[in-house]
Amino acid sequence: MDEKKIQKIDRQIEQFLIRDKDADDYKVRGDVFDKATLKILYKFANKGVITAMGGVISTGKEANVFHAIGQEDEELAIKIYRLATSNFKAMQDYLLGDPRFSSIKTDKRSIVFAWTKKEFRNLKRSCEVGIPAPSPIVSEKNILIMKFIGKDGVGAPRLKDIGLDLCEPEANFDKISGYVVDLYNKAGLVHGDLSEFNILYMDGPILIDMGQAVTLDHPMAEEFLKRDIKNLIRFFKKLGVKCDEEEVMERVKAKNSASERVPLYENDS
């Protein structure tokens, strides 16, 4: 390995940890930057995937997202799933029934690693059919690296953060409901956790957090689809948009563009 590259990343991580000394961030250090995770980060640094490491973009129940710089100063987002605290039982519910992960082991580590790989694949499928989502670059074990949605280390806001200030709510509702249609008919996926918390806005809406997205043959796919649509309708009705759950569901089912769908196994690697 290139020791200089490793030392640079190591110093940046250490500086970040020293700079943020409150109790929560020290807990983050223990949950996220264990030896195995650091080893993978060093590997990506040695390959030139990461050239500089930044601070936290967001923290969630299952993972933390960090800003980084890649080749040619490209801004990246590094999502690190926590092995110690991830709710692997909830993850298992989304994995079981997905033909892509029918042979995974049921221990916590295997579940988290499969979940990370699943998010990479779901993002890849979404981007392939033209749905705005973070473009995935590489994943390994509990780490997913993707293109950063934002500028100069500042992440794009969520719809939840914009709220009533969202411009052109009717047009944005049409766009997002169209993404639901295309995700179902072209990518063969249901987001599974679509809401104002999982949609960023940067020159338009962008879908994120797709680790839980399921294929259409998942036993809960239809229930997840109904829930996604219900969440979408609930949010946009608050903005004064006249919308209806049944109308969106009809759009999803009416298109039925199986011929346009990305092949489930051939391109899903």
Image (cartoon, rainbow, N blue to C red):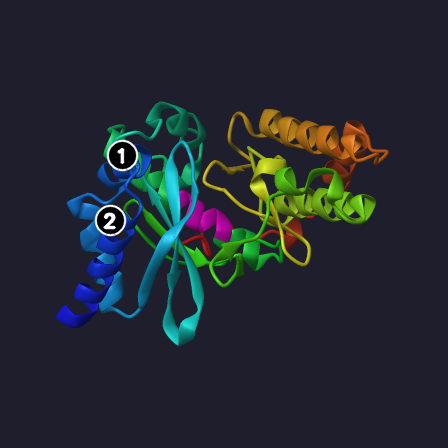
Coordinates of residue 199 in the picture (x, y in percent): 60, 44
Coordinates of residue 57 in the picture (x, y in percent): 44, 49
Coordinates of residue 234 in the picture (x, y in percent): 72, 28
Determine the residue positioned at 33% across, 45% down. 80
Mark 2 to mark 1 CA distance (whole Å): 13 Å
Please name which of the two marks, 2 or 1, marks the residue nearer to the observer. Answer: 2
Task: Give the labeled residue for mark 1.
Answer: 27
**Residue type indicated by callout 1:** Lys
Determine the residue positioned at 37% across, 72% down. 71
Q: Looking at the image, which residue sits at the far bottom?
A: 72
Please state the extent of the stretch shown in magenta in the rendering: 118-123
Whether residue 45 appears in this view of the structure is yes
Task: Give the labeled residue for mark 2.
Answer: 18
- Residue 122 lies in the magenta-colored region: yes
Q: Eyeballing the image, is 77 above or below 210? A: below
Q: Eyeballing the image, is 118 above or below 106? A: below
Image quarter in which the N terminus is found: bottom left
State the count of labels.
Answer: 2
Q: Quadrant of residue 150?
A: bottom right
Image quarter in which the C terminus is found: bottom left
* Residue 136 as seen in the image, left or right of residue 191: left
Q: Earlier in the sequence, mark 2 or mark 1?
A: 2
SS class, disc 2: helix
Q: Nearer the viewer, residue 147 or 106?
A: 147
